[in-house]
Image (cartoon, grey):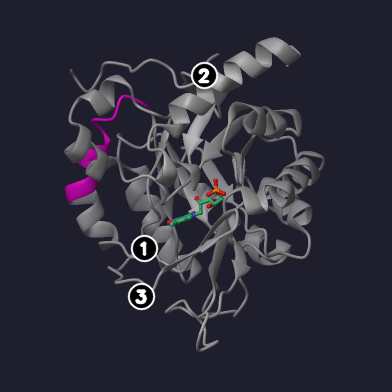
Amino acid sequence: MSPAARSEPAGGPAVDLCGVRLPGPVLNGSGTFDAIAARRAFGDALLERFPFDAFVSKTITLEPREGNPPPRLWETPAGLINSIGLPNKGLEAFLAEDLPRLAELPVPLVVSVMGFTREELAVLVERVAAREEVALVELNFSCPNVETGLVMGADPGETAAAVERLRPLTDKPLVVKLTPNAADPAAVGAAAEGAGADALSLINTLKGMALHPRTREPWLGGVTGGVSGPAVRAVALQQVAAVAGSVEIPLIGMGGIACGHDALDFLAAGATCVAVGTESFRDPSAGRRIGAQLDAARGESRL
Ligand SMILES: Cc1cc2nc3c(=O)[nH]c(=O)nc-3n(C[C@H](O)[C@H](O)[C@H](O)COP(=O)(O)O)c2cc1C
């Protein structure tokens, strides 16, 4: 199958996301689906029945990172706590090795970047957005700015300053990924929009921890981690509704989506697209299933 060929939509109808046409509204959450490994496992069948309508890369940083020490995962009654710590090969190796392979996927490509200073982010955005394979750039703002000590996406002023620095660097759409670990995500979303963001995605993981059942020491090598999966869905839905009430730009809603009815809830709360994260670990074709279920649920509820 040629790279240009389209796979069947994961869940129609087609969506316009910041001028980029997607065959349907179902994306993956960054870092929850390794398309290069999946292609190795499933071959070209992956391209023919790709689970998502756009693919979001794992977050990349300027320099390579090993990530956090193990253990990196803890299963909660309805989800996961991960302390993966953004292991990645860094910008240069991503551009040289991974981007050409991701460009073979039959859907538009979103590349997620994270920087520890605004200048680092500027390099990432400039280099990534300059590549024609990339349709949109997602800014993962869930990390501290080492210069100000503030988490980039937790403070409206910090968010606005970062987006203002990045906005002139590219005409490609910039998607700001909001952290739920903020006092007022709706204010952060409005600040991102005011500074020129084209879309928002939410939620990232909620901060959590787990203790070793015998020693009561922190289980995770990173001590704390990010909670995801159905356990966070109600929180995510509320934050999507709150942010939708404070901005005009499109939202990509995520957090615990495991079936079409969950996805429809996020669209009803104001999202234009949805993303599937933790559910893909249980079922690698979840995106496609949820897309089909969403179509059926829409028919029933006429949304
Ligand atoms: C194992 C794992 C790795 C993740 N890696 C990233 C990442 O690299 N960048 C990012 O923005 N979000 C990352 N996330 C967050 C997800 O993209 C998503 O925002 C969050 O998990 C909520 O969706 P879910 O409940 O459907 O998983 C990760 C989540 C998990 C569970």
Local packing at callout 3 (Cα closer than 10 Å; few below 14, some 14-19, many 20+) is few
Give the CA separation, mark 3 to mark 1.
20 Å
Mark number for residue 23? none
Residue visible at 50% across and 81% down in the picture: 212
Task: Look at label 2 and name its amino acid.
Answer: Ala
Residue 139 image point, x, y percent: 50, 53
Q: Is residue 141 magenta?
A: no
The nearer-to-camera label among 3 and 1 is 3
Give the CA separation, mark 2 to mark 3.
36 Å
**Of label 2 and label 3, which has the lower sequence position?**
3
State which quarter of the image contains the N terminus.
top left
Residue visible at 32% across and 21% down in the picture: 49
Task: Look at label 3 and name its amino acid.
Answer: Pro
Q: Of helix, strand and loop, which one carries label 2? A: helix
The answer to whether 96 is drawn above or below residue 27 in the figure is below
Q: Total label count?
A: 3
- Residue 110 appears left or right of 298: left
For label 2, the residue is 292
Magenta stretch, residue numbers: 97-107
Q: Of helix, strand and loop, which one carries label 1? A: loop
Residue visible at 64% across and 60% down in the picture: 159
Can residue 94 be seen? yes
The answer to whether 217 is drawn above or below residue 112 in the figure is below
For label 1, the residue is 61
Task: Look at label 1 and name its amino acid.
Answer: Thr
Local packing at callout 1 (Cα closer than 10 Å; few below 14, some 14-19, many 20+) is many
Residue 164 image point, x, y percent: 60, 55
Q: Of helix, strand and loop, which one carries label 3? A: loop
Give the CA separation, mark 2 to mark 1.
34 Å
Mark 2 beta carbon near ligand 1 (under 8 Å)? no
Q: In the figure, residue 265 lies in which quadrant?
A: top right
